[in-house]
Each structure stands twice: as C-alpha cells, then as structure tokens.
Image: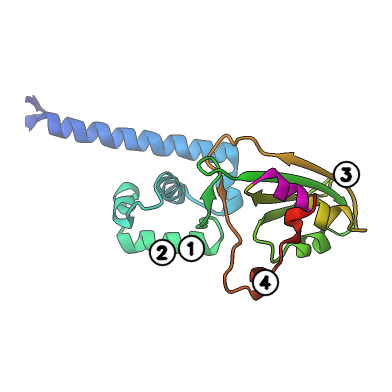
Amino acid sequence: MRLHNGRREGPLKRGGENKMASNKASMVRLTEFNERSELNRQLGLDVRDNIIMSMLQKNSDVSQLKIAKKVKLSQPSVGARIRKLQEKGIIQNVTGVNFNKVNLYLGKIDVNTTDTSAIISEFGDCPFFLNGLVMSGQYNLCLLFMATGLRRLEGIVNHHLRSNPKVKDIQLNIVISTARDFVLPLSIDYDNKKQMECQQHCRDCI
C-alpha cells in the first residue's frame, strides 16, 4: 500500500482503475469499428446495443442482469432494448438443427426460372425446404433443402423442378461443410394437414 496525495491507495483501487480504463478503451475501439463498418448507422444502433448483441450471440442464455452490469444500465432498460432489437428484426431466435453436428445433407439448388415466386410457392409445405433466395445473374433463384440422403435431394429436383415449364436450368450442389455453426430451421409442422398427408413421391423420383 502506498500514499497518493496524502491518501492511502491499495492494489484493489488500482485494479479498479485499470478495469475502468480497459472498459473505456474497449468502448472506443468498438465505436471506431462501427464508424468504419457503418453498421450502426444503417441499423440504428449504439454501442450498448452492440455489446448486448455480442453477449447474446456468445451465450443466448446470458441473464439480463449480467448484461445490465456490463453496459451499466438497469435490468428493465436492458429488457426494453432487447425487445426493441427483436421488433426491428436485429435479434431473432431460430430453432433448428446444427448442420455441423447432425448427419443430414444440405443441398444448394441454383435455378434459372421465369417466375421465382411460383417456384418458391411450390415448396411452401415441403418439410425439407429451408429457404429460397432471389438472386441476380443467370441463376436467379437459390433454394436450400435438407434431407437424410442424396437420393431425396435428387428426387426433389427431378419431381418438382426438371419438369416445371418455368424452370430453364438447374444446378444441384451439396454443401460439404460450413466455416461456422449453421442452424437449419426445420419446416416440420404437425398441424399442417397438407404437409402431413403428403405422399412424398419425390423420395423415389430419381
């Protein structure tokens, strides 16, 4: 322990000052990063929103109280910010399976079509359909499907796409791996009568 301006200063106080300085430096770096990336301006966020999103991304079960201590706000204020981020679509909970941890096949089907909306509607009740992306370029539609095997994916292409007059060309590729965890939002709906009664003829259409 030493004297500073006539007052006793111990290691705990110095440690607290170092932590405050470190937190301040982190906030400055985060602000500078967001100025360069322009994400905050585009999404209407501030530094506290960034920290909240980062903590939730690392651990979706983190408590609002722990977040509140980190961003120096009350727990109700943190809850209000999270709700606002959810309403803006910036925070979204997705329930599904982790592609890197399950034994499933992920198919990426690039389609050259004259009617992207009609093709996407074709799979509205399909339990294997994950998402459809309208693209620029020759292949103007990208379809993502999950299946238990290659036979099923090939059957989906043959049964639903190859004979469709609105489809000009198709390219089917299988995703081997992903750089990060990739959650596949399964589309199985036990209350969807049409889905439950589907005979799944695509299974044998090869």
The amino acid at mark 2 is Ala
Looking at this view, name the residue that lies furthest to the front: 204
Disc 4 crowd, CA 10 A, few/some/many (<14, 14-19, 20+): few
Q: Are marks 4 and 2 in contact (CB under 8 Å)?
A: no
Residue 154 in magenta?
yes
The amino acid at mark 1 is Lys
Image point (18%, 30%), residue name: 14
Give the x, y percent position of residue 162.
87, 52
| Element marked by disc 1 | helix
**Residue that badge 2 annotates:** 80
Q: Are marks 3 and 1 in contact (CB under 8 Å)?
A: no
Q: Could you give the CA–CA distance between mark 4 and mark 1, rounded to whole angstroms?
A: 39 Å
Q: Upstream in the sequence, badge 3 or badge 1?
A: 1
Disc 1 crowd, CA 10 A, few/some/many (<14, 14-19, 20+): few
The amino acid at mark 4 is Glu
Q: Are marks 2 and 1 in contact (CB under 8 Å)?
A: yes
Residue 2, by quadrant, is: top left
Q: Upstream in the sequence, badge 4 or badge 2?
A: 2
**Residue that badge 1 annotates:** 84
75 vs 21, nearest the viewer? 75
**Residue that badge 4 annotates:** 197
**Residue that badge 3 annotates:** 138
* Circle nearer the viewer, 4 or 1: 4
Disc 2 crowd, CA 10 A, few/some/many (<14, 14-19, 20+): few
